[in-house]
Amino acid sequence: MPIHYRNSPVGEPFLFDSIGCGWSQDRVLRPKGFPLYHYLQTEKGRGTVKIQGAEYVLNEGEGLLISPYLHHSYARDTEEWLTAFATFTGTIHSSIEKMVGNKPVVFIEKEQGAVIGALINEIMDNWDVLSADTRALSLKCYGLLMHFTSSRHTRALTDEPLYLRYVAPVIKEIETRYNTELTVQELSGRVYVTPQYLSRLFRRFLGCSVYEYLTTFRINKARELLVCNPRMEVQQIAGEAGFSDASHFIAMFKKVTGVTPLEFRRLN
């Protein structure tokens, strides 16, 4: 029953917070849902998933992508229920909602599930190598997420010249200097384009503006600090994450996560 958890800070657009396969699935009840996008797929047997009053039966090869904070539960229908699963985080994990067309639940049929299952198994088999190269792991995560979109022809970001020339260097700058007074004007100037054009490129490739990416990256850093440093004051966390004003930080944190920093700390 292999399972792997993220062992590095959130510093890439998309990452697996956890991933596993061959899992002997027990009954799960989450009245407040799960804080991240969560994919569950049947490998063997059958299980039933209930999500806010709706019921889904997952036969072998079928799966569900469930949005954050949706009340749900699941239980096996057969004596043995083996599952594969993945949970998704990243500096722009909030853009997954747009990627999947704002659908709270995405049902995956057997044909597509076979492709996703094979990808999960490949990632699990190569975890030691991929976990040491977070950029490569992020691309694998992005590739898996593409199977939940309506597009079957999305190119990998590494094949996009505009992404490599303008977006990737800005992402690196944000990852390095997120806790300083960065502005979109300054970031766009570093790649010699206008702020408007840079934001259009970010929306094209990542589903968000430069400002949204920077804000979400800072919020994710704050989430790490809240969990890993339980005695650190919220005001100090705000500063460490790149917010100069604690009140603005609290407002933005709630806007992105749906809860206040202290509520998030209690939940985690």
Image: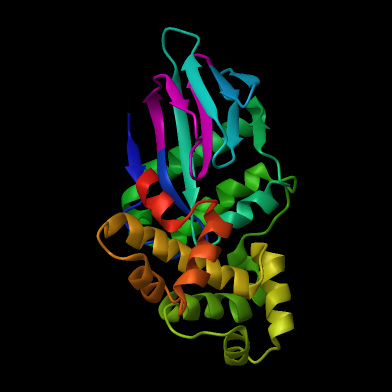
Please tell me whether residue 116 is drawn above or below residue 206 in the rendered image. Answer: above
Answer with left or right where residue 62 lies relative to residue 31: right
Find residue 150 and report its horizontal and vertical position in percent.
75, 45
Q: Is residue 39 magenta?
A: yes
Find residue 223 and report its horizontal and vertical position in percent.
40, 58
Residue at the outermost front position: 247
**Which quadrant of the view contains residue 168?**
bottom right
Question: Residue drawn at (71%, 88%), measured in percent from left and top?
Answer: 194
How many numbered callouts?
A: 0
Please tell me whether residue 230 is drawn above or below residue 43 in the rendered image. Answer: below
Q: Between 159 and 236, which is closer to the camera in this rendering?
A: 236
Q: Is residue 268 visible?
A: no
**Which quadrant of the view contains residue 147?**
top right
Residue at the outermost top position: 79
Answer with left or right where residue 171 lies relative to residue 121: right
Find residue 37 and report its horizontal and vertical position in percent.
54, 43
Q: Between 48 and 147, which is closer to the camera in this rendering?
A: 48
Which color scheme does this rendered protein use?
rainbow
Q: Between 267 and 144, which is closer to the camera in this rendering?
A: 267
Magenta region? 20-47
Find residue 212 and report its horizontal and vertical position in percent.
61, 69
Quarter of the N terminus within the rendering: top left
Question: Residue drawn at (50%, 35%), measured in percent from left and top?
Answer: 32
Question: Residue drawn at (69%, 53%), measured in percent from left and top?
Answer: 98
**Which quadrant of the view contains residue 56?**
top right
- Prevailing secondary structure of the magenta residues: strand
Please tell me whether residue 197 is drawn above or below residue 31 in the rendered image. Answer: below
Q: Is residue 90 magenta?
A: no
Q: Is residue 215 visible?
A: yes
Question: Residue drawn at (36%, 69%), measured in percent from left and top?
Answer: 237
